[in-house]
Each structure stands twice: as C-alpha cells, then as structure tokens.
Amino acid sequence: MPDDPFALPAFIIALVGLIIAVVAAVTGIASLWWQIVTRRRGAHNVKVTAKAALVALSDDSVTDWQVNVRPANVGASPVTITGWGFELPGKRGSLYQVRRDNISTPLPHVLEPGSSIDLFMAQEGVRDALRTNAPDVKPSALRAYVTLGTGQTVYAKRGVPA
C-alpha cells in the first residue's frame, strides 16, 4: 500500500498530459506540412519541357521536326502565358518565335490548373537562327522558357533537342 494517496492520480494526470503533448506535436507537424504543400501548390507553378516532335496535321500530312515547348500548370490557380522563346547561354539574349505558327497555341493563353499547351518552332529554324546569330552555340545549350502574365520567366530544365 503506497504511503502517498495522491501518487497514482498524479501519475495518471502526468501520463495523460504526455499523451496530449505528443498528439499536439504530431498535429502541429502535420499542419505545418499541409500548409507548405498547399502554399506551394496554390502559387503560380508552371513546369516547362522542350522535346522534339513530329506533328500530324488535319490533312494527314506530317510536319518537319519541331521543337515542342510545353508549359504545364501544376499549381492550383490559373496562370497566363504571354510569351516564349529560347535563351542563349551566358545571358547573351534570346531566340523567340516572331511569326505565329498555325500549329502552336495562340498567346496570350490562360492555363487552367492541370492543363498544358503546345508551342512549336521548326528545328531547322532554330538551327538557322543559331548559325546567323550565335554560330558557336549548339541547340542543346539553349534553354526554353515561357513568360507569365506576372512578368515571371520559367525555364525548362534541359536544353533544346537538336
């Protein structure tokens, strides 16, 4: 028989307090994680890729090889794409599409969450522009980019396919 009549109730209260503290800590960590995830997803979050493509046209013909720049909205809010192009290495400027190509999506274009668009430039056109303006640069050294309505520029992680 214990000498202190309050020892067992004090132990139970301490144990319950410890359990509540652990649950509160886990809940706080989960809440912080959720806030980070939703904040990042809610921002203007656009991923850009550049790949080589052949495009099948409505008259059953196929285009020459094209560079396909595809911005995709992976965020939770709409974002406007206002322009696009290819940046030369070393901040030497950009190559961009000056004529509107019929197979590209017209700009400006609002990208809804979860959607993407396709922008095309002929690979031979990229090579010609490089031969004229930057003969020392290979197409793989270019970085595709899109400009957003906010003024932000988003770059592709890889170079342009040759």
Image (cartoon, grey):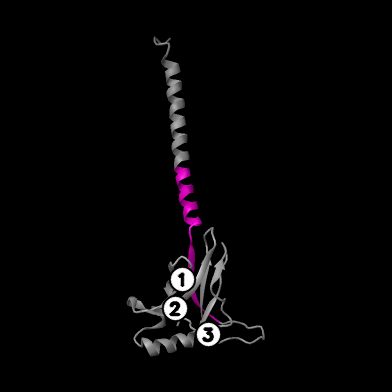
- What amino acid does circle 1 point to? Thr
- Secondary structure under the numbered disc 2 in the rendered image: loop
What is the x, y in percent for residue 148? Answer: 47, 68
Q: Determine the CA span between mark 3 and mark 2.
A: 12 Å
What is the x, y in percent for residue 47? Answer: 48, 66
- The magenta stretch is 29-53
Quadrant in which the N terminus is drawn: top left
Residue tagged 2: 160
Q: Is residue 88 left or right of residue 82?
A: left
Crowdedness of circle 3 by 10 Å Cα count: few (<14), some, many (20+)?
Answer: some
Q: Quadrant of residue 114?
A: bottom right
**Magenta-span inclusion, residue 33:** yes
- What amino acid does circle 3 point to? Trp
Query: At 48% from the left edge and 83% from the top edge, which residue is drawn?
Result: 98
- What amino acid does circle 2 point to? Val
What is the x, y in percent for residue 53? Answer: 54, 80
Residue tagged 1: 147
The label number, if any, that marks residue 65 in the structure image: 3
Q: What is the number of callouts on the image?
A: 3
- Secondary structure under the numbered disc 3 in the rendered image: loop
| Image depth: mark 1 or mark 3 in front | 1
Tell which of 6 and 106 is nearer to you.
Answer: 106
